[in-house]
Structure formats: structure tokens, C-alpha cells
Image (cartoon, grey):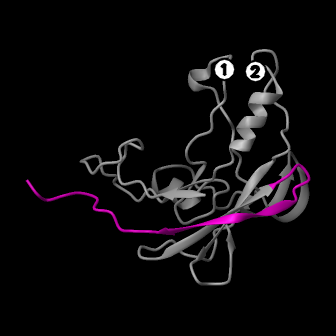
Amino acid sequence: MHCAQPQQLNPFNEEAGDSRSASELGIRIGWDDEQVTIWMNRQFDPSSVTLDFPLGVLGYRIDVRIVNTAAWYSLVHASGPLVVGNVNLGQVDVELGAETHPVQLNGQPTGDFWLPTFFTTWIGGSLIGVDEIKLLLTGGPDLRQNPAVKGVVPTILLQYGNTYEFRVRLMDQTGRHFVSARAMNFMFKTTKLFSLDK
């Protein structure tokens, strides 16, 4: 696994500069699962098949904890009423998953597939669905009363000064998962949002 806390608006800029974010960008999370890309590149000629087919990896479940504590907190836990059209199928309480999709550079029809450096970003809430409060604060619609399956915000807080440990669980087509043996520790630091120096 690998993690990073962006210091700049430009994700490719690794040096200190003036393009600081106006808000916290959280922790970017990735894992070295190049096996998915290898399978994609070996299985088919991308110019002759559709891209809607399973590879055996349905998604990934991401957990977090504070280093030297026992409890893991799922970042992909979801709960709520499952409604399809006018049919209410009842309350569900499940773990969903984050998906990674190998892509072609510039949408080319042939060639090798690539994975992004990071697959998701944790800003303190759930990785599943929309951050309803953030959406509301930025002028979006109020979805808080909308009945739907929604991401459950973990009870662990993302706070400056804490060191977090992340793990990824591979989820197969049946929804079962396998705990990754690898975990990553990451120190969440404060960033200087702007400078008063002239």
C-alpha cells in the first residue's frame, strides 16, 4: 500500500509552491495491485471486445485504524433502505467496495492498460457515496432525508497529528473478501494553506 497527503492543488507537483488548497484534501490511498492490469493486458485484445466483464476482482474494502490500537473501521460500510422504483426491498447493512479500473491513456483503442497511482481519497467520511454535508455546504441539494443506501461515516476521526494504519481487503465476485497481508502507516499532518510573507 501507499498513501500521500497532497500539499498542492496540482497532484503532480511534489515541491512546495503557491498552489495550496483552500480546504483539506485528505489522504490519498493506493495499493500495488498491478495483477488486475496484468490480467487485463493478457486476456484480450482491447480493440475487439467490450469492456463490461468481470475479472474476478469485484472491488476492494478499505479499513483504517489509529496505529497501536486494535479496532479496524471500515471505510466502505453502507446502510439504509434499498428501494428500486416503487418497491422497497427493506433495510440493508453491508460492506460495499471501492473499484479500480485500468484505463487507456487518452482513451486509445489499443495498447496496454494503466492503473492510476491512487485509487481513492479519505477525507474523514465514508468512501461510499456522496458527502451530503459537503454537498449542502457548497450549494448542492439536500440529500439527507432521501431514503437510500448510503455510506456510513466511520466513528474514527481524521485528525492532524494522528498516525493511521490502512489495510485493503480484496473482494471477489461472491462478495467475500480476503485480508491483505500488507498495511500502511501514515501520519496526517497540518499543511500551510497560505503565506502572509511578501
Residue 21 location in percent, x, y? 34, 52
Q: Which residue is mark 1?
A: 111
| Residue that appears at 68% across and 43% down | 34
Residue 195 location in percent, x, y? 18, 58
Q: What range of the chain is rendered magenta?
A: 171-198
Q: Is residue 185 above or below residue 33?
A: below
| Residue nearest the observer in this picture, 9 or 113 | 113
State how many labels appear. Answer: 2
The circle on residue 167 is none
| Residue nearest the observer in this picture, 112 or 8 | 112
Q: Is residue 104 above or below residue 57?
A: above
Q: CA distance from mark 2 to mark 1?
A: 8 Å
Q: Which residue is mark 2?
A: 46
Query: Can residue 182 be found in the magenta stretch?
Result: yes
Taking 102 as reference, is 138 left or right? left
Q: Amino acid at mark 1?
A: Gly
Name the N-terminal-most of marks 2 and 1. 2
Q: In the figure, residue 148 lies in which quadrant?
A: bottom right
Mark 2 near mark 1, Cβ–Cβ under 8 Å? yes
Residue 94 location in percent, x, y? 82, 64
Q: In the figure, residue 97 lies in which quadrant?
A: bottom right
| Residue that appears at 80% across and 15% down | 48
Taking 129 as reference, is 12 left or right? left
Quadrant in which the N terminus appears: bottom right
Query: Can residue 177 be found in the magenta stretch?
Result: yes
